[in-house]
Amino acid sequence: MRRDIFVPLCLAALLCALLAGCREERQSDHTDLDAKPVLYLYPEKETEVNVRLDYDGELTCTYPACGENGWTVTAAPDGTLRDKAGQTYNYLYWEGLSHGDYDFSRGFCVPGEDTAAFLEESLEKLGLTRREANEFIVYWLPRMEASAYNLISFQSEAYTDRAKLTITPEPDSLLRVFMAWRPLEEAVEIPEQDLPAFRRKGFAAVEWGGAELSALTPQEVKQAAASREAMTVAEEETTLELPFALQQIVTLSRYDGETVSSAHIYASAWPEKTALETAFGPIQGPAVTNWTAPENPWPIYTLRIGGTESDYVAAYCGGIWLDNRGSALQTAVDFPAIWNRLVREGETPEGLPLLPRLRILALRDSRWDPRFMTVSGPEAPLEDVPMALTVSGGTLSWKIINRSGQSLSHGNGGFAALEVLLDGAWYSVPRLDGPHWGVTLEGHSLSPGKDFSSGFSWAPYAGLPDGTYRLTFPLHIQAIGPEPLHGYAAASFQLKDGTPALPGSPGAKLK
């Protein structure tokens, strides 16, 4: 899992020397590059100021040293800070490690040679003084101008929600500028980010910083470009009101490519419901078609709002909001900030799937995406328990016969499942997201020579594209020992225009 690094910048030669040990130790253990925030304090008159940092991560270095009660300094109107020992500083510094995510749904793609001019213009718009912007640029420019291109996005809640500042006395104006960026070998298109203006008044506190993230490969850039070229974007915007209500369980999940974190929020009262509505607000943006998830789509966030008979299910991936009601909108949702605001610590319960196996991700515009599907195991179906399929009026029925000479156990017919053949491998077909599909837990015994038959319900799998599919049914061998032996019966068929046809019966001998 990626670990993001936050560091406030110190440019004085002496301070750089003092901090060299922090950086060398960090770089020996982590591959991500530095991020550098610093905090300036400008009171209207000389004032004792206390600054506390509530950081969702691990602090690795601070200067001056941050105690249990934060920093306490005397600040002058020109920004000079003085501690109780009489030492002076230009700003407060800290460094840390975090697992947070950045929002690149909007931003800028800037040629490396144009980075200095871009930063000068952007930082002025954001409200940094010439001195502050100069210190920002002097640090970051050597790293950025050597890149062919830089993907840049100035962060808001994605950063501030996990690095919360409490300043006493409270400033009259607070500016926090945090730049996340990636070096690129080729240009990419990205919706341009609006840069809000900032007006200083009274006691002003100003922070700036940034984080360099890993570069995108040319293959990732080309895949993203191909996806954009194929995608169609509507001219008008659509607004979605999410169906939050009282007495609901809302589940947020995040998949970073390696693990899933999940958290449940019970909207038992108005404060919880209001917090959810405020965090998400209406989802707004143009509808898209022919969208394909980028080659490196992580992290992916999902939202499930519990319902009586059906849930509302949505996923946010690559700047696109998808839901089980058929919506696909290009929109900027600061899901990292929402996650940091509502989820203190996600859990990975035992048995939670490592992939977001959602139909809305696995099947887009009649095209399967195996990254969001589970590949079937290498074991072949049981030849000694053949499955026969019957198609009548678009209805699929099946029957298995136990010719193995051993007693088998199984559940009811509801445990039959669909798989699809993609590039020579079988993948489990995700059921429709939302409806509460249930299976009665029953135990049945299948003696040698006996058969078992059932109809197959298409309802959980409606809307499948044409292709080669197979029906599978799990079986257990009633053998003596601590672990029962498992297998399955299967038979394949073609699906054309929503109708199954041409069933077959592949298999392998029972072991």
Image (spheres, grey):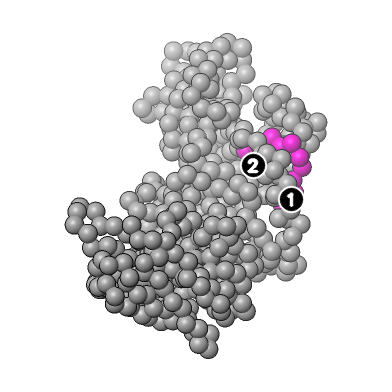
Residue highlighted by disc 2: 154
Tag 2–tag 1 contact (CB < 8 Å): no
Question: Residue at point 50% right, 41% down?
Answer: 100
- What predominant SS class does the magenta segment belong to? loop
Q: Position of residue 17 (x, y in %)?
A: 56, 11
Residue carrying label 1: 225
Magenta highlight on residue 260: no
Give the numbered dot on residue 335. Answer: none
Q: Is residue 492 above or below residue 333?
A: below
Q: Residue at x 73, y 64 (%)?
A: 233
Q: Is residue 183 magenta?
A: yes
Q: Tell me if 463 is positioned left or right of 347 in this view.
A: right
Question: Horizontally, is 352 left or right of 22 in the view?
Answer: left
Between 157 and 437, which is closer to the camera in this rendering?
437
Amino acid on which the number 1 mark rests in the picture = Ala
Residue at (56%, 30%) from the top-left corner?
32
* Name of the residue lying farthest toward the bottom: 393
Magenta residues?
180-195
**Residue drawn at the location 55% of the way across and 28% of the way down:** 31
Examine the rendering and report whether any part of residue 165 can be seen: no
Label 2, secondary structure: give it: strand
Residue 131 coordinates in the image, percent (x, y): 69, 25
Residue 438 image offset from top left, x and y in percent: 35, 73
In percent of width and height, residue 312 lies at 47, 69
